Image: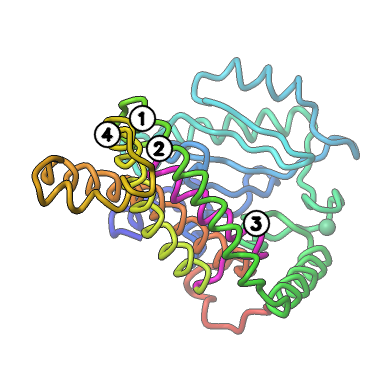
């Protein structure tokens, strides 16, 4: 977290009487008797999200009522309701010191509406109005009662142990990655023959290769990432050369295999323009990387996040032993 972001969170926490979780930077606490979390919105990183878990005389929140309120308040951009979990996406920009006033105002308005509407805080898992804690459950910020926190934490641990114990099927993964690569090669050839720069093809090849491994291999381990990357680099080259070979075969009315083999010779003899050949290949590799890198980053991030489970606490309390 950057220093200015830390500063921003500290100021917002102070103004809204919330506590900043030392690990995630999420603000949590209570206003008007309602538990809430305030964080950078995941659906739109520019905005601030305000999250509640609510019940209305034992019922889940009334979607129509929430919607009407959101429409009437210009400082709320959007909302989402999942069972008792209600998330308001607020207009004040995340990180904007100037808009902290606005943030304080709209938070107060939301809380007062919910209170006059008869809403109470509840656990987002069981719906009981027991005391809830702000916590991270398998990477997801949640408002849970103590017994649900314990139970879901144990379930999560079990799931992880099972998936860690489940052997990764490398062979099936390789088949999956290859199938994904073939899809990409198909794209390179098809789009290449239609005369397009194969930008999209590189991305398709990279994403399908990684997803293919994950789908058939069971999970995308570091070994899987390496295998899929080697395959995608090789297959990008094969697809590219094949595209040229088809053009050559058509032109000289030769067979495809002869044309494929003849490409280095044709470049040496300056029948094909070596500069163009290499230039386009480098471009294609660049697009393969553009497809591969975000896919790998998000997969590794998800894998790490799924292991994160803890109760939010302020910096001062962070030295005590976590339960999970
Ligand atoms: Zn509960």
Q: Is label 1 in a helix, a strand or a loop?
A: helix
Q: Give the residue displayed 70% in from the left and 60% down from the top.
A: 133
Q: Earlier in the sequence, mark 3 or mark 4?
A: 3
Q: Nearer the viewer, mark 2 or mark 3?
A: 2
Q: Nearer the viewer, mark 1 or mark 3?
A: 1
**Is there a contact, CB below 8 Å, between mark 1 and mark 3?**
no
Q: Give the label on residue 269, or none.
A: none
Q: Give the residue displayed 46% in from the left and 53% down from the top.
A: 295
Q: Earlier in the sequence, mark 2 or mark 3?
A: 2
Q: Residues within 10 Å of mark 4 (few under 14, many from 20)?
A: few
Q: Is residue 78 above or below residue 189?
A: above
The figure's colour scheme reads rainbow
Q: Give the residue displayed 67% in from the left and 49% down from the top.
A: 35
Where's residue 108, x and y in %? Answer: 56, 34
The residue labelled by disc 4 is 252
Assess mark 1: CB under 8 A from ligand 1?
A: no
The span picked out in magenta is 201-222
Q: Give the label on residue 193, or none.
A: 1
**Is there a contact, CB below 8 Å, between mark 4 and mark 1?**
no
Magenta segment includes 211: yes
């Amino acid at each position: 977290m950057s220093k200015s972001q830390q500063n921003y969170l500290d100021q917002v926490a102070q103004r809204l009487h919330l506590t900043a979780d030392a690990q995630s930077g999420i603000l949590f606490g209570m206003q008007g008797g309602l538990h809430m979390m305030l964080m950078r919105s995941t659906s739109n990183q520019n905005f601030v999200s305000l999250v509640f878990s609510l019940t209305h005389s034992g019922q889940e929140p009334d979607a129509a009522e929430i919607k009407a309120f959101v429409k009437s308040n210009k400082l709320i951009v959007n909302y989402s309701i999942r069972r008792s979990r209600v998330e308001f996406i607020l207009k004040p920009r995340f990180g904007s010191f100037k808009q902290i006033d606005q943030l304080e105002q709209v938070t107060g308005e939301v809380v007062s509406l919910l209170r006059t509407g008869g809403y109470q805080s509840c656990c987002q898992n069981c719906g009981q109005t027991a005391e809830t804690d702000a916590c991270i459950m398998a990477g997801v910020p949640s408002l849970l009662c103590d017994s649900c926190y314990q139970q879901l934490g144990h379930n999560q641990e079990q799931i992880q142990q099972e998936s860690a114990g489940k052997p990764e099927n490398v062979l099936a993964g390789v088949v999956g990655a290859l199938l994904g690569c073939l899809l990409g090669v198909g794209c390179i050839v098809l789009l290449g023959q239609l005369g397009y720069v194969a930008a999209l093809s590189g991305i398709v090849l990279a994403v399908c290769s990684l997803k293919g491994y994950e789908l058939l291999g069971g999970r995308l381990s570091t070994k899987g990432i390496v295998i899929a990357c080697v395959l995608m680099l090789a297959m990008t080259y094969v697809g590219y050369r094949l595209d040229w070979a088809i053009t050559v075969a058509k032109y000289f009315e030769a067979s495809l295999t002869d044309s494929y083999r003849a490409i280095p010779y044709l470049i040496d003899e300056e029948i094909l323009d070596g500069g163009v050949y290499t230039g386009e290949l480098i471009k294609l590799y660049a697009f393969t990387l553009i497809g591969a890198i975000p896919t790998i980053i998000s997969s590794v991030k998800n894998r790490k996040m799924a292991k994160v489970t803890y109760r939010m606490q302020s910096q001062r309390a962070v030295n005590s032993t976590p339960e999970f």
